[in-house]
Image (cartoon, helix red, strand yellow):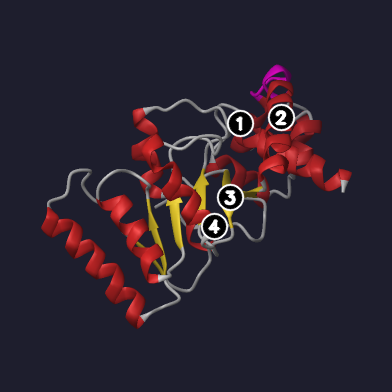
Amino acid sequence: MEGRSETLIQKVALSMIPGVNAELVRNLMEMGITCRDFFTTDFSDERFGTDCALRRAAGIDSMHRDEALFRARREVEFMERHNIRAYSLYDDDYPMLLREIPDAPVVLYKIGNADLDAEKLVSIVGTRRPTNYGSDFCSGLVDDIGSYFPETVIVSGLAYGIDSVSHSSALEKGLPTVAVVAHGLDTVYPAAHRDLAGRIVRSGGAIVSEYPSGTRIFQGNFLKRNRIV
């Protein structure tokens, strides 16, 4: 158990280091370099040659690595207290479709039991201020999807407007729904949707994020999370 926890800490820590992204992680994986190797190996050693990915890894100093490991230990403790799962690009069960995008999250956090590799997933997003017609259309669309494909997972962003209509309609239809948020799983934004978030998790859905706990609300993150949706 202790070994698995340390491996998880290293995977989370890797995602917290500035400059580490999916491209670098994929390059390391292709060369057979594990997370443990990343934190214990001196990549500036001449025996590693001049590979571009290794030069980038060598440029990450020990202070950044140590700080990331310290933060990751605290994050894993938080995860254990709140039954949060983390998927790393290093993991075989990292969500299949998400793995295919160039800028996939290095780590994805999830609370809840929704299957992120479900055979049918439908993403629905839209305006924060829909008309009555727009809301009714969205609700009807989810209802129709559920009638023909009752195993479908509805994915949206937990925002006001069409996002919340999508989640609520899925719950009413008995469909699992996944909310992709732009902050850590220690909070819910907007706060008015705290009850909706709880219903999503309790109904077999999930809340997911690429951000660790304590991440501040930042407008740019809402745009970035759309690639996950």
State the residue position of label 1: 16
Q: Which residues are magenta?
A: 59-65
Q: Are marks 3 and 4 in contact (CB under 8 Å)?
A: no
Q: Nearer the viewer, mark 1 or mark 2?
A: 2
Does the CB distance between marks 1 and 4 fall below 8 Å? no
* Residue 139, visible in the rendered structure: yes
Which amino acid does the dot numbered 1 rest on? Met
Q: Quadrant of residue 91?
A: bottom right
Which numbered disc, 2 or 3, marks the residue that appears first in the sequence? 2
Spatial CA distance of label 2 from label 3 is 17 Å
Query: What is the CA distance from the residue labelled 1 to the residue labelled 4?
Result: 29 Å
Report how far apart the C-alphas of labels 4 and 2 lie in the structure: 26 Å
Residue labelled with disc 4: 202
User: Which tag is nearer the camera, tag 4 or tag 2?
Assistant: 4
Q: Earlier in the sequence, mark 3 or mark 4?
A: 3
Q: Is residue 143 above or below residue 94?
A: below
Q: SS for tag 2?
A: helix
Q: Earlier in the sequence, mark 3 or mark 1?
A: 1
Q: Which mark, by number, is residue 29?
A: none
- The structure residue drawn at horizontal position 44% and vertical position 46%, both measured from the top left corner, is 195
Q: CA distance from mark 1 to mark 2?
A: 12 Å
Q: Which residue is mark 3?
A: 111
